[in-house]
Image (spheres, rainbow, N blue to C red):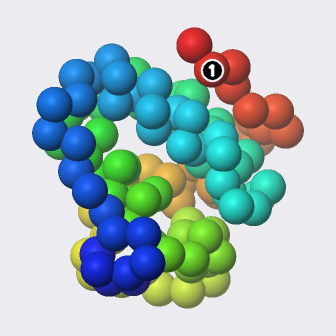
Amino acid sequence: MSENGPNPYIERENENITEKRARLLYQSRKRGMLENGLILSTFAGKYLNSFNPEQLALYDKLINIPSNDWDLYYWATGVKSTPPEFENEIMELLKRHVKNELKETRYTQPDLN
């Protein structure tokens, strides 16, 4: 989970907020595993447009720093404890999204805009 792993996280300094939202939506859809693709894309479709720059940065790090998509899946579903560096308001919102207490239908990914 290190930032120095095989795919180090690189913060994009000159990316405007519209580009960042579009990139994060795309990255949320195109995961290494279908489960995360559905979870993250529906989460992104529902919340990305309301996130402020700090929340977007937290989400960007959450989906792009962990080297193993299974870890992210297990944290979001509560199977494993979330490491302290990812325990924040965005992870809590993602965990609530996964619980789907309103029983929303989430079997398709949102369109890319």
- x and y percentages locating residue 100 in the rendered image: 67, 48
Quadrant of the frame with the C terminus? top right
Q: Tell me the quarter of the picture where residue 77 sits.
A: bottom right
**Quarter of the image where one finds residue 86:** bottom left
- Left or right: residue 15 versus residue 63 is left
Residue at 61% x, 70% y is 69
Nearer the observer, 103 or 68: 68
Local packing at callout 1 (Cα closer than 10 Å; few below 14, some 14-19, many 20+) is few
Identify the residue at image location x=65%, y=41%: 29
The image position of residue 8, as x and y in percent, is: 34, 69
Q: Residue at x 47, y 85 (%)?
A: 81
Residue in front for this viewpoint, 35 or 19: 19
Q: Report the quarter where the N terminus lies.
A: bottom left
User: Can residue 101 be spotted in the picture?
Assistant: no
Q: Is residue 7 above or below residue 109?
A: below
Question: Identity of the amino acid at label 1?
Answer: Leu
Viewed as shown, does residue 65 lie left or right of 73?
left
Question: Which residue has dot 1 on it?
Answer: 112
Measuring from the top left, give residue 42's x and y in whole percent.
64, 37
Q: Vertical placement of 53 versus 32: above or below? A: above
